[in-house]
Image (spheres, grey):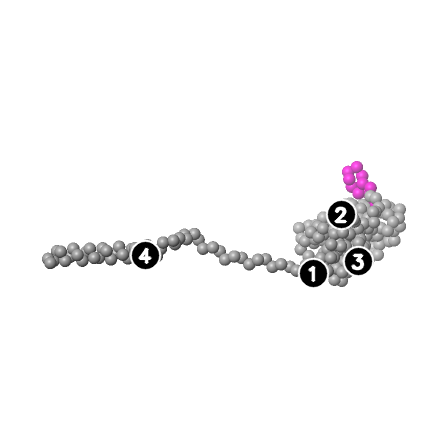
């Protein structure tokens, strides 16, 4: 056999070997499908389920049934989480201000007075994390200033400056001369009427320009609430009464209190404590 014939036979054998290998591979892949999609994400864990006890479920049902037949702010009775006292009611007998007790919660208060919890949060303080026993909270937005006043806050309805400090009418008393027992008033600001409030439910009068003239005392009024309503401090009060003292004079229903300074020079001693 010549060399050319021998080379031809080797080439043919090699070609048949290649065909055989391809046939084996093709047979092995028959029926297979190549997935060209992206890998599937791992399934996320199911959210945790909060178990509600039968007792809590029964309480929720009782609240729904009771409040279905009661108006908002109706007092449905003391309970765990709302064991405080009603401080003030409106003319219909519905609670407007409530005093927090130890271990009270806003959820408990909302349940007791048939209120929406989110609205109560907005009225009280949306950022509050702690409740303080003895604090007065408003059960409606209209009572917010009265509740803050009852809690001891000064001038809760008055405008404030950029730092949040109340802006009030005041007076600086300065001696008319060195060592003089008489001081002269240096008036700053003017009273404004922020509206009827607990402890200041009398009527005010204004002139044609809107400047306040005087206020007629109502039953159960007190000086602290009157000052809060009209936004003036103890120093300004001195110019209305002419008395330089920490304790203002006793007032009675029907008394008329001027709201513009009447005494601009007075004998002064120790200044009143605000």
Task: Name the residue tied to disc 3.
Answer: 78
Q: Position of residue 17 (x, y in %)?
A: 24, 57
Residue 7 visible from this viewpoint: yes
- Secondary structure at numbered mark 3: loop
The numbered mark at residue 142 is 2
Per the image, the residue denoted by label 1 is: 53
The image position of residue 38, as x and y in percent, is 44, 53
Foreground: disc 2 or disc 4:
4
Q: Which residues are magenta?
A: 205-215
Quadrant of image for the C terminus: bottom right
1 or 4: mark nearer the eye:
4
Label 2 neighbourhood size at 10 Å, few (<14), some (14-19), many (20+)? few
Spatial separation of the CA atoms under disc 2 and disc 1: 37 Å
Distance from disc 3 to disc 2, alpha carbons, whole Å, reads 24 Å
The image quadrant of residue 137 is bottom right
Chain-order first, disc 2 or disc 1: 1
Residue 253 lies left or right of residue 14; in this view the side is right
């Amino acid at each position: 056999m010549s060399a050319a014939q021998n080379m031809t036979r080797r080439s043919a054998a090699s070609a048949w070997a290649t065909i055989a290998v391809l046939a084996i591979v093709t047979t092995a892949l028959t029926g297979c499908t190549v997935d060209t999609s992206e890998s599937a994400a791992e399934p996320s864990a199911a959210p945790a389920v909060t178990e509600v006890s039968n007792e809590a479920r029964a309480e929720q049902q009782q609240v729904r049934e009771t409040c279905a037949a009661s108006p908002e702010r109706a007092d449905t009775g003391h309970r765990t989480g709302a064991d405080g006292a009603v401080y003030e009611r409106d003319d219909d007998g519905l609670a407007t201000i409530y005093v927090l007790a130890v271990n009270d919660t806003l959820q408990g208060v909302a349940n007791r007075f048939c209120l929406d919890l989110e609205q109560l949060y907005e009225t009280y303080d949306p950022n509050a994390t702690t409740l303080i026993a003895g604090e007065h909270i408003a059960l409606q937005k209209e009572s917010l200033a009265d509740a803050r006043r009852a809690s001891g806050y000064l001038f809760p309805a008055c405008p404030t400056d950029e730092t949040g400090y109340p802006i009030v009418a005041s007076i600086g008393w300065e001696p008319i001369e060195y060592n003089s027992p008489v001081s002269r008033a240096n008036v700053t600001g003017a009273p404004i009427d922020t509206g009827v409030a607990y402890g200041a439910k009398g009527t005010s009068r204004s002139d044609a320009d809107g400047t306040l003239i005087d206020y007629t005392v109502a039953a159960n009024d007190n000086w602290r609430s009157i000052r809060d309503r009209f936004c003036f401090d103890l120093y300004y009060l001195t110019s209305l009464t002419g008395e330089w003292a920490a304790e203002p004079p006793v007032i009675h229903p029907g008394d008329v209190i001027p709201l513009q300074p009447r005494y601009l020079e007075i004998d002064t001693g120790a200044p009143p404590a605000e």
